[in-house]
Each structure stands twice: as structure tokens, then as C-alpha cells.
Image (tube, rainbow, N blue to C red):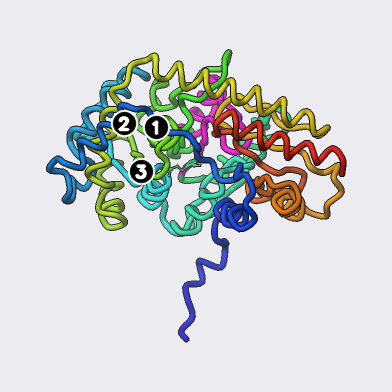
Amino acid sequence: MPRTARRLAGFTESVIRGMTRLANRHGAINLSQGFPDFDPPEALLSALERATRGPHHQYAVTWGAPRFRQALAGKVRRFTGLDLDPDRHFVVTCGSTEAMMASMMAVCDPGDKVVVFSPFYENYAADAILSGAEPIYVHLRAPDFSYDPAELARAFAQGPKAIIVCNPSNPCGKVFTRAELLEILALAEKHDAFVITDEPYEHIVYRPGEHVHCASLPGAFERTITCNSLSKTYSITGWRLGYVQAAPAVIEQVRKVHDFLTVGAAAPLQEAAVAGLELPGSYYEGLLASYAAKRDLFLDVLARTGLTCTVPQGAYYTLLDVSPLGFRTDTEAAEWLIREVGVAGVPGSSFFREPEHRYVRFHFAKKEETLRAAGEKLTRIASR
Ligand SMILES: Cc1ncc(COP(=O)(O)O)c(C=O)c1O
């Protein structure tokens, strides 16, 4: 058999999705892959029913259905103050996953460097390899996951093409402050680099924190490429809807990559999702209140195990320090948790560049009853 591509040797299949398969095999409560077990808003469900009977069953415009892009521009204006052109500033993609891959391929040539904070969302390493870029890692240090400005400056001094900023961060829940984003932007300007942000959890930032939309900071728009998604905001991870938002010159290039990668996101789902983009402010307040309650409940559950965990400022993940359990690796701990305790998480090492084997990551985007059921099972940890 001929050999397959060498570039794929640098990464494995997603560890997160592998844990989901293991959880299913053992009937464990799945707190590994971050998706809700509750329904999307009713407005979206009824819009989806209507969309199935409408004229939306063929290819939409490749960079996004016009009605969807108009609604998107309206929502971005409402939340960020940016007055963007639906025809020139957006490409609608199959989730933020494609948005990031298409952005990386649009800006990176083979051999270019890209700054990535560690811990990082596991896709970024694969995105870098597939676009031929080489990551330079900058450490985020527990417990607050701050970075060392000198280390960041040294990374920029290596002349990267871009920096990836996941805000709020999966897996560590860090929310970048305005001052941090301004510092990153100043370095990007000095070294003429793009800032690629990944913001699918923009509406899940716990008080008193606030989400600062990097592209709306003074002078930021031209070099900021925003990757975003409807997956988490409207609890529709299976609809695969996301977008890239950037300056027209960048969007023109992203459109080309996107066109040949996927042609476009599903037309009927874009039509139905307009109902989500038009939801009032109270929807987003409700979403945040519900995640704040889930966070409190789940952190309480974890505290009862006798172990410690990170307290997220945003998004819906926490890293549980499993080192006192005495396993050789976090992978062994995660497999034990699935098999013997019945709750699935993700070995934390898959998010870190440095050899960090202390953590298992859990998410809490689940009904309160699911979190309570997981809590009952997790109490078994205390007796190990
Ligand atoms: C930081 C981050 N980016 C992107 C994604 C993927 O989102 P999408 O469903 O829009 O592809 C996720 C999903 O967990 C994520 O956590």
C-alpha cells in the first residue's frame, strides 16, 4: 500500500472525541466532549421546522446565505459596536473549527510561525501542522493562567505570522482582559502579525468578568481575524455553523480556502439560525445565568471529592487535579474514571505543550440532573 502523508504523523485523532467513544462503550456520563444535553431555544426549533418546508435545500452562496450574514452583522453590531458589511466582512463556515482552519490556511505559508498559548484547544496544533505552520508556545500559568509578558515578547521576537487567542479559553477558562489584549495587539503591530481569536464562548463569561471583543479595540480591526461559532451560544453544536469575521482583504482569501474545503455551511440550518441571531438581550442574560448556576453546582460536586480544580472565568470547563489519586498518567486516571466511576473527562495533557499530567478536564454544559448524577458517581473518588 502506498504511504500516506507525512504531515499527519505529527498528530493523532482527537483525544476529546476518542474519550466520547470510550464513554459510550462503558455507559459513562460523558463530561468529555463539550456539548449540551439540553435543547436549543424554542425559537430555533420552530424556525428549523419552517426551514425544512422552504426553498433552502440547495447550495447557499458559498460564503454564507445573505439573510444569515445580515442577521450576523446585526448581532455583531449590537454586542461589539462594530458596523460591518455583511457582504465584505464575513465568511460563514462549518463551525469555528473550519473558521480556524480556513483562517490559518489563508494567512500561513509553510514554515511560518504561529504563537499559541498553552494550555490550548487541541485543534490548534493540528491546524498549525495542516497549514504548514510551526507553533511557538507561550505558557499560561495556573492557577490564574496568566502569561509572562517577557515570554510573550520573546515569542513575537521570532517573527510569527500570527498569534491564536482563545477567549474565553478552553480548557482553562481564562478570560483575557482588555489590558492583555492591548498588549498582544501592540506586539502584533510591532512585529506585523495577525491576531486570530477564537471566541465561541463570548457569551459565557462569569461576572464580574467581561468579554472584550478583540477586533473592536482601537486600531485592531485590520489585523484581527475573529473565528466564532453558534455552537455554544445557541446549544447547536451539531448544526455546524460558524464564521470568520475580518477585513475584506483577508476575507477574500478565506473565502477561497472555504470554497474548496466545504463549499458552504448547510443552507436550511443557516436559514433557521437567523431566529437565534435575532433573539433579544434577555436570551443571553438567561444563558449566562444558567451556566453560572451549573458552574457553582459542578464546582461544589468536585469539592466533595477532596480534590482541587480550576475555577473558570469563562466557558464551561474545569481542570480537576487528579495527581493525589496516584495514577502514573492523566490518561490512566481518565480511563479509570470512565470504567470504575462512570464519568468521562479528557486527559489534561492533550491541552498542554509542557509535560503536564496533573489534570482531567470536565465540562458542565449539562442539565443540572446530569451534573448531580455525575456528582453522586464522583463521590466514589473520595474512597479510593
Ligand atoms: C475553543 C473552541 N474553539 C472551537 C470549537 C469548535 O467549535 P465548532 O462547533 O464551532 O466547530 C470548540 C469546541 O469545543 C472550542 O472549545
Residue 86, above or below 216: below
Hey, what amino acid is under mark 2?
Leu
Out of 1 and 185, give the one closest to the viewer: 1
Task: Decide if residue 226 is on the left or right side of residue 148.
Answer: left
Please check the rendered image and state whether residue 167 is part of the magenta-colored stretch, yes or no: yes
Q: Which of marks 1 and 3 is in front?
A: 1
Give residue 236's position: percent from left, percent from top. 40, 38
Mark 3 or mark 2, earlier in chain: 2
**Residue 40: mark in rendering:** 1
Out of 354 and 150, give the one closest to the viewer: 354
Between the C-alphas of marks 3 and 2, the distance is: 11 Å
**Residue 203: mark in rendering:** none
Q: Are dots 2 and 1 in contact, CB under 8 Å?
A: yes
Q: Is mark 3 on a helix, strand or loop?
A: helix
Q: How crowded is mark 2: few (under 14 residues within 10 Å), some or many (20 or more)?
A: many
Q: Name the residue under label 3.
A: 239
Q: What element carries label 2?
A: helix
Task: Decide if residue 91 is on the left or right side of residue 123.
Answer: left
Q: Which residue is drawn at 50% across and 40% down?
A: 35
Q: What stretch is highlighted in magenta?
A: 162-189
